[in-house]
Amino acid sequence: MFSTRLGLSPLLHSSKQASSALSRLAIPRTTPLRLTLPSATATPRRFCSSHRSADNKDGKKDITMYLQETHDKVFENNRSWAAEQVAKDPDFFKKLEAGQNPEYLWIGCSDSRIPAEQITGLQPGEAFVHRNIANLVCNTDLNVMSVIEYAVKHLKVKHIVVCGHYGCGGVKAAMTPKDLGLMNPWLRNIRDVYRLHEKELDAIPDEEARYERLVELNVYEQCRNVVKTAALQQSYAENGFPVIHGWVFNFRDGLLKDLNVDFETILKDIQKIYNLTA
Amino acid sequence: MSSSNTFQYALSSNNAWAGYKAHQNPQFFPKLAGGQSPEILWIGCSDSRCPETTILGMQPGDVFVHRNIANIVSPTDINTTAVIEYAVVHLGVKHIVLCGHSGCGGAAGALSDARIGGVLDTWLLPLKTVRFNHAEELDAITDEKERVVRIAQLNVEEGIKVLMNNATVREAIAERGLEVHGVFFDIGCGRIRELGCGTAHKFPAGDHVVRGKHGQLVFGQDGEAEIAAAQ
């Protein structure tokens, strides 16, 4: 088993497809991308020579086996997770099946390192979740707008959290002067955030610090975008909730940083122009 | 628990979690900070009862995630499309898992004739289309819960078709054997099962696939530590 996983790395790294995918990347090497990851620590000593060619039959069989096994592992994990929950509380799934009553809407990044529930310790049923590239809330995106509307009007969540993270590949990609094809329309929204805060960002000499600040400002702007929605404004006027929070997750220590977004002020601010309560 | 308590709970719980993880493995966060290499792109429902990484028993770094109302894959939705593009081209994920679930509010909404209002009716249109295309089968199901389950499964099959026709996905299937799976999460028992659509036709619908212990096979950055723990 051990060998199967490790044996694959050099295969993929040497394959034509992998390098062509890599060459299509317009993002600097520092960005967290699959193919630039150091598998050096995981590079096998035993298997590198015999498994190198992606074209040979054994190699192909290896990939098939590997895909099957990595896939099966998920099902196996799921079974043991389900069994564990039942052992702890025999009615766990019965209660879940009865319905959801989450207090939170979480709008976060798709990044695999930020599973909302695990990092907050929230249980199944506690957080309604939308995750997209760079945790954006775009006015014309029916996908996220539907999520907000459903969470606020139908589930009546009390908190909406927009959670970004330092080291965001999407934010970095958007700072890169390159045509990223299908991703352009999406990432364009981050470029707009930069333009809104151009002076502040340009004044930061250190690139890393500038990038981290853009991550924070992006969260801030997306919080504003949530506040601009009719669903939020109407529910808040009527019920006094939900309230908005902007958080940033830091991989270095695993901690969430509360940006202390001033919800009341934002609401007052935007309603001069974006008031949709009537 | 009052709502402000829940909020404080999440923040303090994060503190505890971070401390625990770092204590368990001091390299955990430094490794995460180094980058991500997920092998799975998960497209699932926003429903709070379907936390993908938790129900898969996986760790941060393992699963790239998009979750929306009723796990709809709409061909012109730029949000989902950007996620797919990033995951398949830039991260090179090996599996795309599209997951539906029982008791889906979006699926129930599509079965109703009432207008939901706002933008939701438009978003749920693909599900409505599924409903009308399978009216005969769905109408024949007398149990309401079962009807919601069935339309949610048909919705996954429909989403898989859209995924398989996505140009980026097609290329990756042909060039490097990317696998696309349609699965279903039964909230009533916590189990996931394959629906037998996508590239994984070899799995008969309804079977739980289990092949021995793969504790040694671990996704993502935390591979080494998990291998040790599993042995």
Image: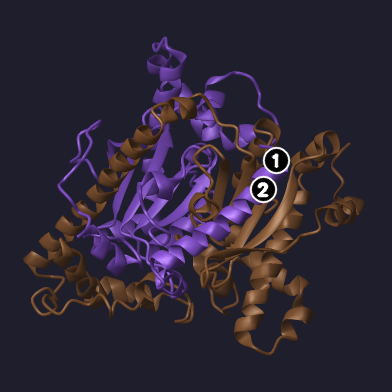
The residue lying at 54 percent from left, 25 percent from top is B110
- Decide: is B56 above or below A45: above
Q: Is residue A26 left or right of residue B24?
A: right
Q: Nearer the viewer, residue B133 or A2?
A: A2
Whole-percent x, y for residue A236 in the image: 81, 40
Image hue for chain B: purple
Screen quadrant of the N terminus of chain A: bottom left
**Could you classify mark 1 by the number of other residues whose Cα lies within 10 Å: few (under 14), some (14-19), or many (20 or more)?**
some
**Type of residue at label 1?**
Ser
Q: Secondary structure at mark 2?
A: helix
The residue lying at 38 percent from left, 37 percent from top is A85
Q: Chain letter of disc 1?
A: B
Residue A138, image quadrant: bottom right
Whole-percent x, y for residue B73 in the image: 47, 43
Q: Nearer the viewer, residue A99 or B85?
A: A99
Q: What is the letter of the brown chain?
A: A
User: What residue is pinned by disc 2?
Assistant: B7
Separation of residues labelled 1 and 2 (CA atoms): 6 Å
Q: Is residue B119 left or right of residue A172?
A: right
User: Could you tell me if residue A94 is visible in this image?
Assistant: yes
**Type of residue at label 2?**
Phe
Q: Nearer the viewer, residue A25 or B194?
A: B194
Whole-percent x, y for residue B10 in the image: 60, 50
Q: Secondary structure at mark 1?
A: helix
- Do the residues at discs 1 and 2 belong to one chain? yes
Screen quadrant of the C terminus of chain A: top right
